[in-house]
Image (spheres, helix red, strand yellow):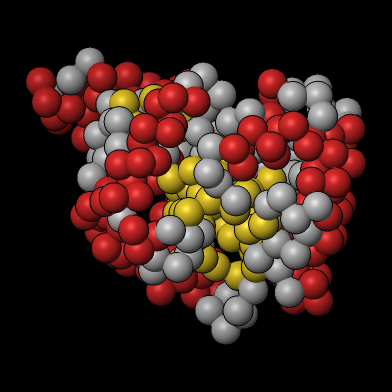
């Protein structure tokens, strides 16, 4: 099922209904309500929904955005934080988002689970720069040594933060079951984020008997990790297909620019989509910088190449 996220045009609108109208006019009737949404836009979105203008396939936590956060910051409050206030605020906002998801009859809610306290500038950004500078090719031993150090350091300190994430998810899952909204735990772009791949498998196995918890594959995020040799994209997706609830679809300009228009970058969607049930949501999650004309052109090509996802 092809769908579209409001993250693309949210910042350009002060009223929720014209925001929805713009997406619908491009031929997308299935819409994901994304994070960073000011609560003042909610009435307009509700008006458009009640008028039958769109089908809400899902929401992305937090929706709407916390009132004290003036920018689009889905990680402003984390379940893994050392500050108890932040953990509570994250939980309160998540439960509120679940209520709204149920009101829109959404099938899923996308979740970020937090992070471990490692400065990305010293780790993910540095290793990405090493790849961009071709250190992995010109000095592979130096690159491998740094990557091994990165992985070991994260594994050493991650246990507490993983436990906090699991504890939070168990609590959220209780309400998700009551409202019949699936919790889609998203693959993240930074290795410091929670869960990483090893933890994601453990998390999904922990909840394997809970039909309201599953995996959300973000094509761009996973490709960024593929580019720095943390994983192999197609192998990872194939291994996670039993847990899959849907995906965020966007392309990548090597090595680190994601949320590009599908079919304009480096991703081999022909190979990757073989591992995803075409009836699951394929939600285009694009940068606000992407042009309408580029999106419409890519949509035409996508519809011809992958009609099973429509």
Q: Residue at x 79, y 72 (%)?
A: 179
Relative depth, front residue between 6 and 151: 6
Is 293 placed above or below 85 here? above
Task: Say whether residue 57 is left or right of residue 138.
Answer: right
Relative depth, front residue between 242 and 166: 242
**Residue 154: image x %, image y %?**
47, 43
Q: Residue at x 75, y 64 (%)?
A: 105
Q: Residue at x 59, y 60 (%)?
A: 184
Task: Say whether residue 199 is left or right of residue 49.
Answer: left
Q: In this view, which residue lies farthest toward the left?
A: 138
Task: Say whether residue 49 is left or right of residue 3.
Answer: right
Is 56 placed above or below 63 here? below
Occupied quadrant, residue 107:
bottom right
Relative depth, front residue between 162 and 92: 92
Task: Say whether residue 157 is left or right of residue 155.
Answer: right
Say if residue 224 shows up in the picture. Answer: no
**Residue 243: image x %, image y %?**
46, 70
Q: Residue at x 30, y 64 (%)?
A: 275
**Residue 89: image x %, image y %?**
85, 45
**Residue 199: image x %, image y %?**
48, 59
Q: Quadrant of the C terminus?
A: bottom left
Is 68 placed above or below 181 here? above
């Amino acid at each position: 099922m092809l769908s579209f996220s409001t993250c693309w045009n949210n910042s350009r609108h002060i009223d929720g209904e014209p925001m929805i109208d713009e997406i619908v006019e491009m031929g997308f009737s299935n819409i994901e309500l994304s994070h960073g949404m000011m609560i003042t836009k909610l009435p307009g979105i509700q008006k458009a929904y009640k008028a039958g203008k769109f089908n809400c396939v899902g929401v992305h936590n937090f929706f709407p955005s916390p009132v004290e956060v003036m920018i689009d910051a889905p990680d402003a409050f984390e379940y893994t934080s050392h500050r108890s206030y932040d953990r509570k605020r994250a939980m309160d906002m998540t439960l509120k988002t679940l209520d709204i998801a149920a009101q829109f009859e959404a099938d899923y809610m996308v979740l970020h689970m937090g992070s471990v306290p490692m400065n990305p500038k010293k780790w993910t950004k540095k290793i990405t720069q090493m790849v961009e500078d071709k250190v992995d090719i010109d000095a592979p031993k130096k690159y491998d040594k740094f990557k091994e150090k990165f992985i070991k350091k994260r594994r050493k300190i991650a246990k507490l933060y993983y436990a906090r994430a699991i504890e939070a998810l168990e609590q959220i899952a209780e309400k998700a079951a009551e409202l019949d909204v699936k919790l889609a735990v998203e693959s993240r772009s930074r290795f410091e984020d929670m869960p990483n791949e090893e933890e994601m498998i453990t998390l999904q196995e922990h909840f394997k008997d809970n039909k309201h918890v599953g995996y959300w594959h973000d094509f761009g995020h996973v490709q960024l990790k593929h580019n720095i040799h943390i994983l192999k994209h197609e192998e990872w997706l194939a291994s996670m297909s039993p847990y899959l609830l849907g995906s965020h679809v966007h392309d990548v300009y090597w090595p680190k620019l994601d949320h590009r228009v599908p079919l304009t970058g480096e991703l081999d969607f022909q190979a990757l989509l073989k591992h995803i049930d075409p009836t699951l949501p394929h939600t285009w999650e694009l940068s606000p910088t992407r042009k309408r004309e580029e999106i419409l052109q890519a949509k035409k090509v996508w519809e011809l190449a992958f009609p099973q996802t429509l």
